[in-house]
Image (tube, rainbow, N blue to C red):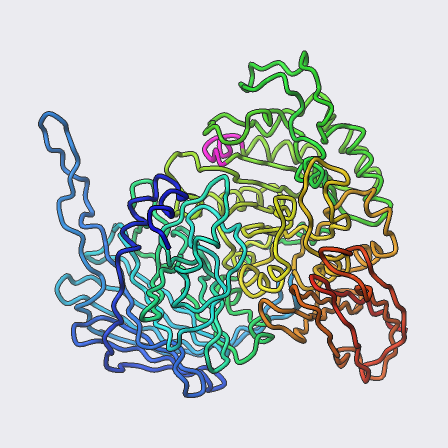
Amino acid sequence: MNITKTLFIMKTKGLTLLLFLALSCQNRPQQGIVVKDLLSPDGKMKMEFLLTADGTPQYSLSYEGSQVVLPSDLGFELRGTVKASKLVFGDRMEKVDEQEPYSLHDDFEVIGSSTDTFDETWAPVWGEESVIRNYYNELLVNLKQKGTGNKMDIRFRLYDDGLGFRYEFPGMQPLNYFVIKEELTNFVMADDCTAWWIPGDFDTQEYEYTESRLSEISQHLEAAVCGNSSQTLFSMSGVQTSLLMRTDEGLFVSIHEAALVDYPCMHLNVDEKTHTLTSFLTPDAQGWKGYMQTPCHTPWRTVQVTDSATKMLASRLILNLNDPCIYDDTSWIHPVKYMGVWWEMISNAGSWSYTDDYPSVKLGITDYSSAKPNGRHSANNANVRRYIDFASANGFDALLVEGWNIGWEDWAGNSKDAVFDFLTPYPDFDIKALNEYAHSKGIKLIMHHESSSSVRNYERHMEKAYQLMDMYGYDAVKSGYVGDILPRGEYHYGQWMVNHYLYAVTEAAKHHIMVNAHEAVRPTGLCRTYPNLIGNESARGTEYQAFGGTQPMHVTILPFTRLNGGPMDFTPGIFEMNLSSFADNSSHVNATIANQLGLYVTMYSPLQMAADLPQHYEQHMDAFQFIKDVAVDWSESRYLMAEPGDYIVIARKAKGTGQWFLGGVVDEQRRSFDIPLSFLEPGASYEAVLYRDAEDAHYESNPQAYVIEETRVSADDSLKVTAAPGGGFAVSFKRL
């Protein structure tokens, strides 16, 4: 990859860092002596804790005797001062550190250890199943650095489907307050694995996935990068988690993190020669990685290992490593099927802004009452009522309305502090009347809080904004963080922003409000602890189909990667694929209608949107029936067939009704399936309604060609179905 060209496309504040990492290389860690080992409950997986001759802690991981992770270093490099820097007086006063950076990486001895076994079942408020088993063996290793007296514990939890470990720092020791320069956690892969990855970036995850060997990442990085309103890449071989890999022996391995709280998000820098993945934390505006006060601990670092792709989809390791729900009352938290005044703005058929008269808006000064409407503002009373009527007539729960509030005329790309007040509607949006109308139709409106990444501004308005929602009966909000972060210099995935995202969720809980955050840090299972975090975007979603399109294989990878840590607000359900037919937009949605139906089963979310315009659904109400019927909360999920980048087939049982639904999506290839229906109740008969691609369907040339077939089936039967290129299928089963 051409360095000069790469630097040109990267954000300015990341240039020096990028060049450094491009020219640096990690060495393979030296192998240590086994101190302790740990077996998974089923005995198939083994973790060994080691110490090298110089006192560096390491771990390794094997599955049924095959090495998955070779001995890999653990530890940190810390900023060399824990005190206020001293001033040097002269022509210019400067702050300088009192000490050089120092290591929390070697010179350790083991001063104690303990083991434990834990086995429980717990019931999520919502989820892919109604009961989850949390079963692991645990090893806690107590370490002391001989030269400094600093103490560091490492807690390992080994499950049948993988390993979680974290660093813990006890209080009352020399190491009290400290600043992390870098976390040195390594994952030395035993193979040059095939990986499905997106570029490492401190500000966005909205990339398509690339499939390559670990040794080939830098060769593909430039092609993998697309433009975004905020992006900061850090390395030509840097990738993001959840990173899915397949070993040459056919094992599936995923590296991620769990319970990300008060700590920067972890990325991975890949040494392509040694296949070593090294943690690379998101820095703050000064370049430091994390600010810690003992007693404290890091998030969990996770290595999931399974012998099949379907087992990887079924893994709940990330959720299990999070704390139980902190709310005593969760009755106000509920799954939602919704529509939105959204796609027409995304597609450029409408506008978020009310007027073209004001290229510069100042809150409290700009007078919208005298402004000329631009005629394209989608969040107007008549249009919102039209959506409410359609959503109500078809059994939906809620309607999202974007562009309702003043300030959209100059909201993006201006590094503007006071960009929105989240309180004041445009003149053509009667918030009181529209909420009353929605409630009369059995619909709740979903609030929209786009912050334009002016986070300080959002926080100072947040309480009043939540109070406004209380006043008008909103119980859910979609928040957004488009653009570079204010305070300037901070990144979307740094410690400061990680704390903000959780603050928004916990403050919302005080008002019994559910949160769906877009452009936020990727989920790490916190929805177990805070189930009002009902959804996130945090990946390349459907909106990019209006920005030039997305490869069909994208939806066959996301359930393995992005959804590993929690559900995504993917916004499926597009029926009109040629956007030029209704908007000033030449983009084509790379999917068939049957594919879009299949996503409602394969792309799990308790927050499911029917994203297209009502008039497009009215042209295909027979296919729209599946969107009306499909559940959003499940008691059981069966992962039937899957290969990342190729296809996914999943069956789910609706919570409360016992009705089964089946969905499948494929990549650019035509694929045929023979699906056993053994998940159905034995001895029972079901009416199956199959929504599939027509024989001549194709995501590029004939995406709206589908067939609906009804048949009677039982658990003894199998379903033969063919999906077109970029296609899929969906089935509803009704017990007779």
Q: Can you say whether 532 is above or below 307 in the image?
A: above
User: Along the horizontal axis of the image, is 180 left or right of 228?
Assistant: left
What stretch of residues is rendered in magenta?
A: 453-461
Work out whether 373 lies above or below 619: above
Q: Is residue 226 magenta?
A: no
- Secondary structure mostly seen in magenta is helix
Q: Specify whether 134 is left or right of 30.
A: right
Q: Against 250, is 702 above or below?
A: above
Indicate the position of residue 421 as horizontal and vertical percent values: 56, 27
| Quadrant housing residue 150 | bottom left
Position of the C terminus, as image quadrant, is bottom right
Query: How many numbered markers are drawn?
Result: 0
Which residue: 85% across, 84% down? Answer: 683
**In the picture provided, is 635 more to the left or to the right than 36?**
right
Residue in view at x 30 percent, y 51 percent:
293
Q: Nearer the viewer, residue 191 or 378?
A: 191
Furthest-left residue in this view? 90
Q: Where residue 228 sits: x, y (%)?
A: 50, 42
Left/right placement of residue 56 relative to residue 216 reads: left
Q: Residue 624's spot in the image, x, y percent?
A: 83, 54
Residue 558 image position (x, y, % from top left):
58, 61
Q: Name the residue: 22% across, 70% down.
A: 56
Which quadrant holds the N terminus?
bottom left
Residue sitting nearer the eye, 670 or 663 = 670
